[in-house]
Image (tube, grey):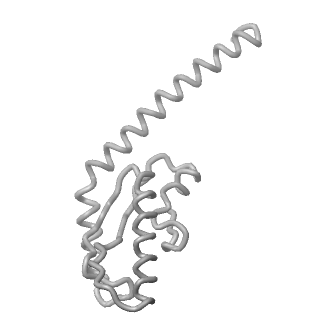
Amino acid sequence: MLVDGDWVECLPARSAKDMGAQVIISVDVSRETPRFIGGSGLDIILRSDAVTRIYLNDLLLADADVLIHPDVDGCQWADFSGPRELFRAGEKAALESLSAIRTAIHKAAVFRKTLAGRFKTIKDKFVETFAGGK
């Protein structure tokens, strides 16, 4: 399991693949971004940062095989008063994603078997060509 804490990668799927994970299941807990009304210079800077993070998050989503998106709208990142509701939202979203998770695992297994068979064939041909037989 890889958790970044949203400092470097909002969804560290690419890092997980680089570490050897064969199926990437990402949980995106970002919320809908409220409409920007305007305000101070600081508000504009904070909104610009939020837009940048949303764009980066969208780019990183492409690396996930399965994306689980629990309904966390209305929750603030620093509100720790209702963790059970958040856990339930995550569990509900995960259960709704089981079919996609099973499909991703199956595809990865089929790919591994196909790839393993091709490597064996290449290895056998190499041995026949350069080592004079098996």
Quadrant hosting residue 32: bottom left
| Residue at x 47% of width, y 30% of height | 113
**Residue nearer the viewer, 101 or 75:** 75
In percent of width and height, residue 114 lies at 47, 27
Image quadrant in which the C terminus is located: top right
In percent of width and height, residue 15 lies at 55, 57
Quadrant hosting residue 33: bottom left
| Residue at x 58% of width, y 53% of height | 19
- The answer to whether 50 is drawn above or below residue 128 in the figure is below
- The answer to whether 120 is drawn above or below residue 97 in the figure is above
Horizontally, residue 15 falls left or right of residue 34, namely right
| Residue at x 39% of width, y 49% of height | 65
In percent of width and height, residue 87 lies at 30, 74
Q: Residue furthest right?
A: 131
Report the number of numbered marks. 0
| Residue at x 45% of width, y 52% of height | 63
**Residue nearer the viewer, 15 or 105:** 15
Q: Residue furthest top?
A: 132
**Residue nearer the viewer, 54 or 24:** 54
In percent of width and height, residue 9 lies at 51, 66
**Residue nearer the viewer, 132 or 56:** 56
